[in-house]
Amino acid sequence: MSTTTREAVLSFEDALEKFDPTLGLEVHVELNTNSKMFCPCPTEFGAEPNTQVCPTCLGLPGAMPVVNRTAVESAMRIGLALNCSIAEWCRFARKNYFYPDMPKNFQTSQYDEPIAFDGYLDVDVDGEVVRVEIERAHMEEDTGKSLHVGGATGRIHGADHSLVDYNRAGIPLIEIVTKTIPGTREKAPLVAKAYVAQLRDVLLGLGVSDVRMEQGSLRCDVNLSLAPAGSGSLGTRTETKNVNSLRSVERAVRYEIGRHAAVLSSGGSILQETRHWHEDTGVTTSGREKSDAEDYRYFPEPDLVPVAPSREWVEELRAALPEPPRERRARLQQDWGFSELEMRDTVGAGALGLVEETIAAGASPATARKWWLSELARRANEQGVDLAGLPVTPAQVARVQALVDEGRINDKLARQVLDGVLAGEGTPDEVVESRGLAVVSDEGELSAAVDRAIAANPDVADKIRDGKVAAAGALIGAVMKEMRGQADAGRVRELILAKLSA
């Protein structure tokens, strides 16, 4: 548990009475290339620390970088999917400041000449389309990862010592930066969440990243400022760094609106700074005072030639783009027979791709939606993670439904099967076997259980004999209780009515 100090926060409603929020979102996307941005080191997630490094990504003297062509192509595809213009000529720059986890002490990035610029993404928010304008999408490399040991928060303050893993240093990144997003008012948190969710869908469709927020392959920095209501001006912004779930994006925006409003209402001023988001407490804390661009001493990277993609290459990539997300949603809604509200809830829950994959694995649209938006959504909410962060795959969910359709389990038992899968006990079939969850289909065993229920409830049995068939529910419940929910309720009902038909 973080020992964060809570600052004063105005209620969301009171904040919006006094102030207008303006958003800006920066999303960092790790590309799924086989090698790093400027060297041939592998990029596999979860490898032993410092095993995927070489002289280039370690910044050793004399090592020379070479641009990853696939990363450049992925960057252009992302730009095109976001309706951006693709630069005819661009180059890399050195962004200079001390990186404990970047051994070169500079990051190779793009500054005033990004590969993609001036685009937009139309985002659906509660039935309204909000156009989020994209300022730029540029190429850069990721840093290494620091692990602070011995403190209570996992941050450097209070830690005994720090360890650095350079495996991530040099992995290709695309940073997608929006222009300011004004006028969202009370929908600001939802717009931020919807934008990141829809951007994730775009990236998944392109196949350029696994966009696993819980693993850090998609990270969002939330810029927020407040200005007096109706003034049309911009306030001083803060940047909440590395928010790693859709749920947290929404919560971070909502919290910062309340915090900014409390500071300004008390006569204080907002410090332009970076902030850290704490998932456990739902608050942000101060990081460091935010630097301006000139503080980074950008200058062109002397060891890399400019990137000048031909127009033929650009148009070839444009022609091969997948279906745009809004068109895809409209098509899937029609194919699946979902109502507008059902589709909106599916998209809002971040479940569209999961439902689609579950259907592709054999489930019906209705059952796929049922599992993801009810049972699994409840578990994700309890654990404070996005649906995609749950340790269950669409294929496994489809298999659970197949077991129900085959009559091997019922819906109640299916929930226990999901519990086992989420707990890491194996595949759905293995969980059914190990937990002994299969529906009892032995006719003799079912018949004996029905006889015992009838004998224990003679008054109910008499009602059924007198034609009150609805009373059979009490006997069915008794049988299901005795058999721990593992009886076929339909077959139990048939047996009860057959035995009492005289």
Image (cartoon, rainbow, N blue to C red):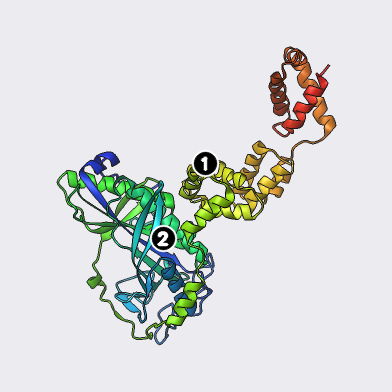
Spatial separation of the CA atoms under disc 2 and disc 1: 24 Å
Residue 208 or 304: which is nearer the viewer? 208
Q: Residue at x 26, y 72 (%)?
A: 296
Farthest residue to the left: give it. Answer: 267
Which quadrant does the C terminus fall into? top right
Q: Is residue 94 left or right of residue 332?
A: left
Quadrant in which residue 89 is drawn? bottom left
The spot of residue 159 in percent (x, y) is: 37, 57
The answer to whether marks 2 and 1 mark residues whose Cβ atoms lie closer than 8 Å is no
Q: Is residue 351 left or right of residue 115?
A: right
Disc 1 marks a residue whose amino acid type is Arg
Disc 2 marks a residue whose amino acid type is Arg
Q: Is residue 46 left or right of residue 447?
A: left
Q: Which residue is mark 2?
A: 219
Q: Is residue 4 visible?
A: no
Residue 77's label in the rendered image is: none
Residue 64 or 51: which is nearer the viewer? 64
Sequence order check, earlier mark of 2 and 1: 2
Q: Is residue 295 visible?
A: yes
The spot of residue 91 in percent (x, y) is: 35, 81
Q: Which residue is mark 1?
A: 378
Q: Secondary structure at mark 2?
A: strand
Up/down of 101 relative to 200, above or below: below
Q: Secondary structure at mark 1?
A: helix
The spot of residue 273 in percent (x, y) is: 25, 59
Q: Residues within 10 Å of mark 2 (few under 14, many from 20)?
A: many
The spot of residue 298 in percent (x, y) is: 28, 77
